[in-house]
Amino acid sequence: MSGMMKSLYIEDNVSINLKDIPIPQPANGQVLIKVECAPINQFDKEFLNGYKIGQKPLVSTVPGFEGSGTVIASGGGLLGWQLKGNRVAFYTEHQFGAFGQYAIADVNYCAELPKHISFQEGCCSFINPMSVLMMYQLLGNGSGIVSTGACTNLGRMLMRYCQSKGINVINIVKSQGEEKQLKDEGAKLILNINQEDFEEKLKLMASSYNTTVLFDSVGGDLLSKILNLMPNGSRAYLYANYSKKSLEGIYCANLMYQNKKIFGFSFVDILQGKNIIQLKLMMNEILNNIQGCFKTLPTQIFSLEEFEKALESKEKAILKI
């Protein structure tokens, strides 16, 4: 397919502009997707701030890591031809990402959308829901969770999914408004970090519910503050760093004598370690629950021309291409 397309384009690692560029051509094992919707994730914000993510180039590139649309061309291969003409959700680290009228994606990272799932629902099928499944796979038998990003879309998904599996989740919030929000969504265990007895309550709850895994999105001194209060043998996984600060306050003795550990949670690395059968099973579970455990709310819809407003949105922003 030839012609031009509108896209957001990064030319010099400094500015991002809406411009017309040639429609890209898929290689073997890839497909060309006419994009309908693409969410703006933390991945995208970090990338736009100059952080290298996966194989995606930082310059001469169309940003956007996931979206939904219709496969209109295949670069070759059985899976690509089978997807042609189908509605799909996709993840991509290709030079031509989701923030354009057309995107390139590897066939392994495309999932056919059932008819009852809209493009808007389907565009958020990969990064957050799959991260939740990856986190679930890291849990040991009977382990409970502490979640610091409890009111983010990923945090809400983690709470809903793990509670559906009978796993206790201690949700950390910072305001009464967030506490009410999570209660309305069915969260059972909530702690406000700004309460005077927060540390005492967390230590008691972590012990009572065998909470030995921390999923942290804040970084700074919060990770260490919480990990220090958790039982011996606890593990912390840092999957984002909203505080933009270095880790502080780690008690070395806790790591040496209480067998506590800190890991980075890399979605990209874990994803690359999955084979096509594992990916298929995970995507089937996600799409079967995309209107339940893995729903994304609330959202605001923006056009490509409104990209700057979308970046500033306090709610989940989705670009309608």
Image (spheres, rainbow, N blue to C red):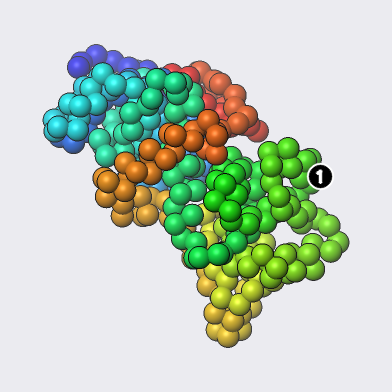
Query: Could you tell me the amino acid type at mark 1?
Result: Gln
What is the tally of numbered marks visible in this picture?
Answer: 1
Considering only vertical position in the picture, is 83 above or below 135? above
In which quadrant will I find the N terminus? top left
Q: Residue furthest right?
A: 196
Where is residue 220, by image quadrant?
A: bottom right
Considering only vertical position in the picture, is 145 above or below 20? below
Q: Position of residue 19 (x, y in %)?
A: 39, 20
Which of the pair 189/240 is nearer the observer? 189
Q: Position of residue 10 (x, y in %)?
A: 39, 32
In which quadrant will I find the C terminus? top left
Residue at 44% across / 57% down in the picture?
137
**Residue 114 visible to the viewer:** yes
Left or right, 191 with respect to 292, comes to: right
Under circle 1, the secondary element is: helix
Residue at 31% across / 51% down in the picture?
274
Left or right, 83 with respect to 320, comes to: left
Q: Count residues near mark 1 (Cα–Cα under 10 Å), then give few for <14, some for 14-19, many for 20+.
A: few
Which of the pair 96/224 is nearer the observer? 224
Q: Which residue is mark 1?
A: 176
Where is residue 223, by image quadrant?
A: bottom right
Residue at 56% across / 43% down in the picture?
157
